[in-house]
Amino acid sequence: MTKAQPLTRHIISINDLTNKEIETIFEVAQGFLKDLADDNISYRIGRSTDVAAKSILATLFYEPSTRTRLSFESAMLRLGGANITSADPTVSSAAKGESLADTIRVISNYADVVVIRHPRDGAARLAAEYSQIPVINGGDGSHEHPTQTLCDLFTLKTKKKSLKNMKVAISGDLKGSRTIHSFVYALARFGATIDPLPAPGMELPAYVDRRLREEFHCRMVSKDPGQPHGGSIDALYVTADQPHQLSLIPDPEIDYGLLVEKKIDAVYVTRFQKERWSEKERAYPKVDAKFLGEARFSEASVMHPLPRVNELDASFDTDRRAVYFQQAAYGVPIRMALILLLLHLQKNQSLNRFSGGFAEPDHPVYAQPIGTGLQCDNPNCITGDPAERQYAANKFYIVESDSPRQRRLRCVYCEKDIDETTAVHFVVADTVRKTFSPGLQPLAHAGHDRLKHLVIYRSDAEAAASGFAPRDSGGNKVRTG
């Protein structure tokens, strides 16, 4: 009997990994550090193994990278494997106009696993749809950077042992940093408290803030003791102990007053993401010895995903709290562990917890025919790229809001929400009956066969312009004219 091959697994979001799987990655990475560490630097991999001697890693980078690309390539070499790379899109077929979908289908024939970095949000998810081999997201637009978060969490665990009840301050560009978006989701899942310190106008995006509150069950606690709660700028995100607990209900087990006063366990500094902002110069906080001299930071590990520009003073490098170069070094054992597990090369079968593809989404997925109906309104989404339009369907999660009667749509690729506004009132059209009705209710309980006959529009006018007529309360076509 032929042995069944495991399904291809992709890592596009930090949420593609369960907490147990993340712990498994840490366990394997720690094993590599124990067996292969440099004799003089405990956090540096200094020796190699041959466990992946017959495997090839492809790095497909459409944006500049130093740490992510080189640490992945170093990880594969340390595993005994080989690398092929396309690190400059100006000398690849992308310069000729080749689509990402076609590129990834070709690369699937040349390698066993591929790491992709791309300027478009959701590009890695699109690549995964067309790949025969595991796709790892090395950063896509301002969406996510999951493997950086694995390095960050591993660094925190080596310093603090447990992430639960840890208080982490995040400073700088929280809006444009894909690293921050993956990081805050993971912190919430592991029970940490998040203290945002954004640069002016660079707060967490509304969709990230909402997910933290509604899906990761974070309660907003004001930093001002005189206020019962606050907005995302002046408040902490505190994760409820029970996953089913609503974010607006106080947890009786948590002393929120003490939590506000608790010292910071880690400060995570980010640079100004100038490539994602039209303004090239603006006010930006600087983290230096004076800033970190405050009593609340006295025992805080200072982290940075790098590269840094001027936001973190180089004079701080010799401080005992500076861990950012160690954080970068952990990129090799963490990525070695991830490659090993994705390729099912581990000898310890108890660690074989990566069989299967994406985890089942928490929300129903609705896919519209290409070129019809609603499109993602994120201008940087991969679905808006002219070269990719014919390959990317209009796919959305149907997300239940706080009210069970209210729903919103979330792009499957970039994961940004499309909300109903004064200018947008969703209507659902039926291609069989040639009618449309307001709201997303028709999608709620429709089976697969039914969904394929439904198309979402932003307004009655759009649906009518496409040849649909409104339905009355009885489900009949309303006669006009």
Image (tube, rainbow, N blue to C red):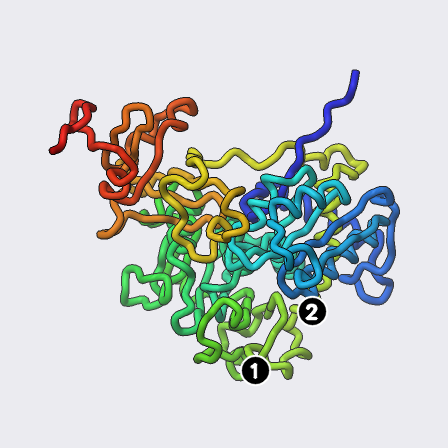
- Image coords of residue 364 (percent x, y): 42, 33
Residue receiving disc 1 = 289
Is there any visible trace of residue 157 in the rendered image?
Answer: no
CB contact under 8 Å: marks 2 and 1: no
106 to 89, vertically: above or below? above
Q: Which part of the image, by quadrant, shows the C terminus? A: top left
Please tell me which residue is depicted at 23% across the width and 41% down the height of the picture: 460
Please tell me which residue is depicted at 34% across the width and 26% down the height of the picture: 445
Residue 325 — which label? 2
Place residue 1 in its image quadrant: top right
Place residue 183 in its image quadrant: bottom right
Is there any visible trace of residue 299 in the rendered image?
Answer: yes
Front position in the image: 369 or 248: 369
Front position in the image: 481 or 445: 481
322 to 60, vertically: above or below? below
Front position in the image: 191 or 252: 191
